[in-house]
Image: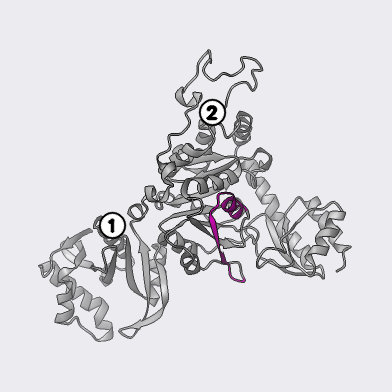
Amino acid sequence: MEFTIIPYKSQAYVSMCELRDEILRKPIGLRLSPAEIEKDSGDTLLVGLENGRVVACCILTEINSASVKLRQMAVSPACQGKGVGKSLLLFAEKTAREKQYDTICLHARKLACGFYEKQDYSVMGKEFTEVGIPHFEMTKTINLRRIMDLKSLVRENIFHLTPYSCARDEFKGEASVYLDANESPYNPDFHRYPDPMQRQLKKRVSEIKNRKPSQIVIGNGSDETIDLSFRIFCEPGKDNVVAIEPTYGMYKVCADINNVAYRKVLLDENFQLDAEKVLAATDAHTKLIFLCSPNNPSGNLLKRAEMLKVVEKFPGIVIIDEAYIDFSNEPSWLDDLDKYPHLIVLHTFSKAWGLAGLRCGFAFASEAIVDLFNKVKYPYNISDLVQQTVLKQLSIGADNKNEWVRLILEEKEPLIKGLTSLPFVEKIWPSDANFLLVKVKDANTIYRKLVERGIIVRNRSSVLLCGNCLRITIGTKDENRTLLEALSFIYV
């Protein structure tokens, strides 16, 4: 199968018109008029050829300097179901990208929407009728590398910053005598500065997460990488960020610390995202969008299709916080980093790996963005003790982590069943994390009475959409039993 661009009114063009008539028009009793054919003259005409015969075709029509429309795509019956349509679509996207278009749109028959959604096209607006057939407008961003001008997103002083060069940056390898960093020659367990780039740890993490070491930033928990994102991209007093609400509270705290406006977009009653509302909250000074999935405190995964709309349409930095992804069956966004160079994905060892006390988190991003993080972070932000302890834990392998995750998830249903049996529990939301959001009759009273019994949960009543809600972490079998026994003696 050969895919190629053809000249207007060439022999291949005539064959293309015949195929369009046969596939697209004949079933509804219409044929291409001379006026419709004449519209092709300024377009890009694409065909799939098999033994010199046109078996697939489509047309790219410019909408404006940034957008192109794909129309009249047809595949001969003999080639349908063999991946020819997908191959032609990819060739059309490649052609449009080479012509420097940023987005491609199309009108898809309702029955074909599933096919295009699998190719990362998003539905725009409501259903409409075209030539008597239900259609949807769909769109896809195809040229994010051109849309995202990193220099325009970064604070100017940070872009031109010459970072502090520490002694261990200037020398790489092993030496027998170190007299370069004014360290003490005594107390050999801790007297040397740690590797500022955490090379050994990044190498091990890259093997586990299937990312290059140059795509990894290691922080003092995820909180450090969140704060660094503000310091790199947001001009204090001028720029803003957008985040869903409710969500992890540190996004707003970091915004307030950095004097950056924080715009909240309320989730729906099921704690789900509306991409259009998120995008509508942005403006020319919006540098970051935060999406936490599975979300905290609701525990649910955000719909990937809605997240994808945000990722593909927002020309700034999208940060997806996946602190709880190990408890979910859904794939991580890490595999999308190469496709979307403006994406930052946050992971942590604090949850599934049981290493919260070590404070070790990760940001995964393009090498260009990682270089900016390395410019701004403190030189020795991760102690040698933390690096070596995490490496030791990882050397055991993922088996322990996977077993801990299994045990936690195994306890989820019995805990839900026990909580549901309590008379003051009104609702428990579905969770893809290691905690439950539970609506009760009087959260303040229940929280206080649990504290009196030495049991601590999180009272989220003051958070939007979380009135009278407690967030309860799933513990061990004994811890969960102790909680349920204590709750059985509480009356509200």
The location of residue 308, given as percent across then percent down, is 45, 61
268 drawn magenta = yes
At a point 38% along the width and 67% down the height, the residue shown is 116
- Specify the label residue 58 is tagged with: none
Measure how far apart labels 2 and 1 are at the Cα level. Answer: 41 Å
Q: Residue furthest left?
A: 10
Amino acid type indicated by mark 2: Asp
Q: Nearer the viewer, residue 346 or 10?
A: 346
The location of residue 417, given as percent across then percent down, is 76, 64
Question: As displayed, is residue 107 above or below residue 484?
Answer: below
At a point 57% along the width and 25% down the height, the residue shown is 193
Q: Which residue is mark 2?
A: 195
The location of residue 53, given as percent across then percent down, is 17, 65
Label 2, secondary structure: give it. Answer: loop
Q: In the rendered structure, which segment of residues is drawn in magenta?
A: 250-269
Q: Nearer the viewer, residue 59 or 311?
A: 311
Question: As displayed, is residue 327 above or below residue 274?
Answer: above
Q: Nearer the viewer, residue 460 or 118?
A: 460
Q: Residue furthest right?
A: 489
At a point 71% along the width and 61% down the height, the residue shown is 460
Q: Residues within 10 Å of mark 2 (few under 14, many from 20)?
A: many
Amino acid type indicated by mark 1: Arg
Label 1, secondary structure: give it. Answer: helix
Q: Which residue is mark 1?
A: 97
Q: Is residue 30 left or right of residue 442?
A: left
In the rendered image, is residue 235 in sight?
Answer: yes
